Structure formats: structure tokens, C-alpha cells
Image (cartoon, rainbow, N blue to C red):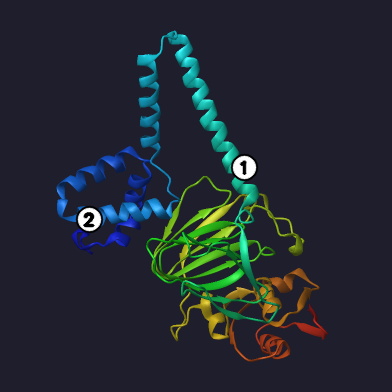
Amino acid sequence: MIERSRFNAEDFLVDSTFQQYCAGTDKLCIEYWEKYIKAHPEQADVIAEAKRLHFILSGNKRSVFTQLDKLKLNLNSEAKTSKLSKSYTWLKVAAAIVVVISISFFYRGYVSQNKPSGVLQAQTFKTKGGERKKITLSDGSIVLLNAQSSLSIAEGFNEAKREVILKGEAYFDVAHNKNKPFKVHTSDFDINVLGTAFNVKAYPDEISSEATLIRGLITMEAVNGNGSIITLKPSQKVTFYKTIAVASKQKTLKPEAARPEITINHYTLIKDSTIVETAWTQNRIEIYDQNFDDIKSVLEKWYSVDIKFTDPDIEKYRFTATFSHESIDQVLSALQKVENFKYEIKGNQVIISK
């Protein structure tokens, strides 16, 4: 195990207790890290840098306890100079709390209604079905945009900050700039980056969205969540399951699956060291023990077709396969050798039956 004395700022940032210390959300963590810092003055600079980065990545949110202490200080100061009665002072405290809570709820409501559309857009790149684009941003960052996706660059990008809005899927290789964190807005979550490589898949018509970290460090926060922040380590993948079934799927989620759910796993690495989640950047479709219903959306976007199943049992067929330059006809023909089904192609319509 690596000793903390050899940690850099990013190593401290991925420690959950250090995150809680920086956020000021757990008194035990705060006490522990305050003692640790006193006992290790030689690490003061590294820890200070880690705290600064956490402050940036968490959206410049101050400690809950720091804000509370400041509120108490202000109230005490007012109490010393005020000639109002004690009961009236408590009314002021109650009013202040109500105002803070009201502002908090108003802000969350505003955010949930305006993200990511609240960010002014200066330029938008789009791809059609079966199309992929490579985009070089003004800061030197590289973005590979997958099929049926759009990337909007925020107004004033790379001036004071770097923000983009993604609908669909993209692979980001972000140029490092600690003074200008890179932020990706999606309809389900926001991602804060310093300099790293990661994949984001957030199609509006799919029931889940995901972010996969290849290298570096990112933090992720659900748009309609409780404000908690997830820090990802390299090789980790976060999957966010939406709260309602997607209309295009025309399905009803089971009651136990109707609530929001976030899972953290590792990306899928196959025998030739290919990462399944980013294989599309190499012009490959990697199917790894997936059911037909999951594969359906991939094939629809890759080949710009509309696939219909005539029997729900077909959706449960599972496959593992690799495709690169094959046509949709060749792909389905190959899958037929694994499971017994029939298909018919009429223009961009594909009908699959038993």
C-alpha cells in the first residue's frame, strides 16, 4: 500500500474521508484530518493544493460548518449591538433560517429546470446516425463525438472557465489547466475535470447514462440529486439509472426499479486490452455478454436504422461479439448463428422476429 507521505494532491482527493473533511460534512473526518495535518507539516503544501482543487471541483462550495459558524457570529454580533428583545432576536434567527432554506430550495429548483440549457451556447457540433466526428477545442482538448450526438461549447469558453454541454456520447481527452477546470453538463449529471481522459454516454432516449474514467481525475454530481459528489478513480465507471422509463422504449419500470440508482463498477476490459466502453472510438462495436435490447440502441445509432422486436423474448437473447466494417445485414446474420431469430430489412426499418 502507498504511504500517505508519498501522496500527491489527486491521491488525497480520491479519499472519501478527505472529501468529507473539505466539504465540512462530517465532524469526525474534520477532526481526524486536522490532527493529521498538524502531525505532518511536511505535507502542508500538497494538502493545501488538494483542498484548493476540491474547492474548485465542488463548485466553490464552502464548508457547511464554516457557513453555520459565520451565521452564528453574525447573529451574536447583532445581539451585542441590538436593543431588541430576546424574543425578537429569536424571530430574526428563525427568519434567517427560513430565508436560507427558501433560497436553497429556489436554487435547486432553478438548477433542475435550467441545467444544462442555462449555459449560454456559442457553437454546437452535431452528428447524424452512423456518423462520428473529431473536434479540437480552443484549449487543445480533443473530443470524439459518437453518432446521433451534439456538443455545445459555452460562450466565453477558455476565458475564465471551460464548459460544454453534451447530448449523446463523447470521448474527452482534456488539456490540463488547473486554473480553468473543464465542466461537462448533461441532462442527468455534471462532470468536473482538471486534465484527463474519459467517456460520457448520456443519450436522452436511453434509460441509463454513464461516465467512464480512463485516466486522471473527475468528480460527478447528479443534476437532480442531493448535492453529493462522486470522485472517480481511473478504470471506474458510474452508471446513472433514470427515474422513469424512456418514452421511446414504451416500457413500464418495475416498482422496485422506479427510483434513481447510481452504481460504480470498473470498465470492461477484454483479452486484447480493448476497453468495451470506448471501443467505438476505434471504429469497433464491442458486445460483451449483453442482451439484444441493450444492443438494439447501439446498432440503431451506428447504422442509422430503426429496430423493432415482434416478441419480447427476443430482447433477452444475449451475445458477445466484435464488429467493425460489417453492414447491419452482416451483423444480424452473424448474431443468427448464436441465437435463432429471423430478420427483415426494409430501408432503414429492421423487423426481428422468432
The circle on residue 45 is 2
In the picture shown, does residue 164 fall above or below 278? above
Give the left or right position of residue 187, taking residue 173 as reference: right
The reply to whether dot 1 and dot 2 touch (C-beta < 8 Å) is no
The circle on residue 166 is none
Numbered disc 2: secondary structure: helix
Marks 1/2: CA distance? 38 Å
Q: Assess disc 2: are there few (<14), some (14-19) or many (≥20) residues with their C-alpha within 10 Å of its C-alpha.
A: few
> Of callouts 1 and 2, which one flags the residue occurring earlier in the amino acid sequence?
2
Which residue type does callout 2 highlight? Asp
Numbered disc 1: secondary structure: helix
x, y percentage for residue 239? 54, 62
Which residue is nearer to you in this view: 225 or 272? 225
Residue 354 location, quadrant: bottom right
x, y percentage for residue 112? 62, 48
Residue 127 location, quadrant: bottom right
Quarter of the image that includes the N terminus? bottom left
